[in-house]
Amino acid sequence: MIKSNTGELKQKGVDDLIAKDMLTSASANCYDIAILVSGDADLLDVVRNVKNIGKKVFGAYFRRSISSKLKCAFDKCYEMTLYDFD
């Protein structure tokens, strides 16, 4: 977490940590299916690399925050709604 100019706390480097964990765990054969809860296009390369290792990647996302390329890269997709959290 870092502080912005307004004093607000923001996440920094989370995508990199997710990518590193997904790739190292896939390479170590720790899982068969990764479930990524994100719609961030910055994770497209890691999804492709994990799939190239032979793993499946399922994605969960909100409709308004999904990259179309990332959605196409997922093996299975789950569109979340606010009702999923009631």
Image (cartoon, helix red, strand yellow):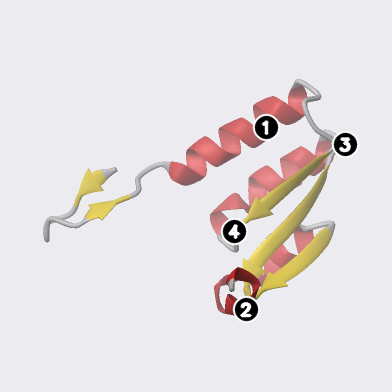
Q: CA distance from mark 3 to mark 1?
A: 11 Å
Q: Amino acid at mark 3?
A: Gly
Q: Residues within 10 Å of mark 2 (few under 14, many from 20)?
A: few
Whether label 3 touches label 4, CB < 8 Å:
no
Query: For mark 4, what is the residue?
Result: 38
From the image, state whether disc 2 or disc 3 is nearer to you.
2
Query: For mark 1, what is the residue?
Result: 23
Quadrant containing the C terminus is bottom right
**Image quadrant in which you'd find residue 63:** bottom right
Residue name at image x 87 percent, y 36 percent: 54
Query: For mark 2, what is the residue?
Result: 83
Image spot of residue 13 (x, y percent):
40, 41
**Image quadrant in which you'd find residue 67:** bottom right
Q: CA distance from mark 2 to mark 4?
A: 17 Å
Q: Kindly state the secondary structure of the residue where label 1 is placed.
A: helix
Q: Amino acid at mark 1?
A: Leu
Per the rendering, the mark at residue 54 is 3
Upstream in the sequence, badge 2 or badge 1?
A: 1
**Image label count:** 4
Q: Residue extending furthest front?
A: 86
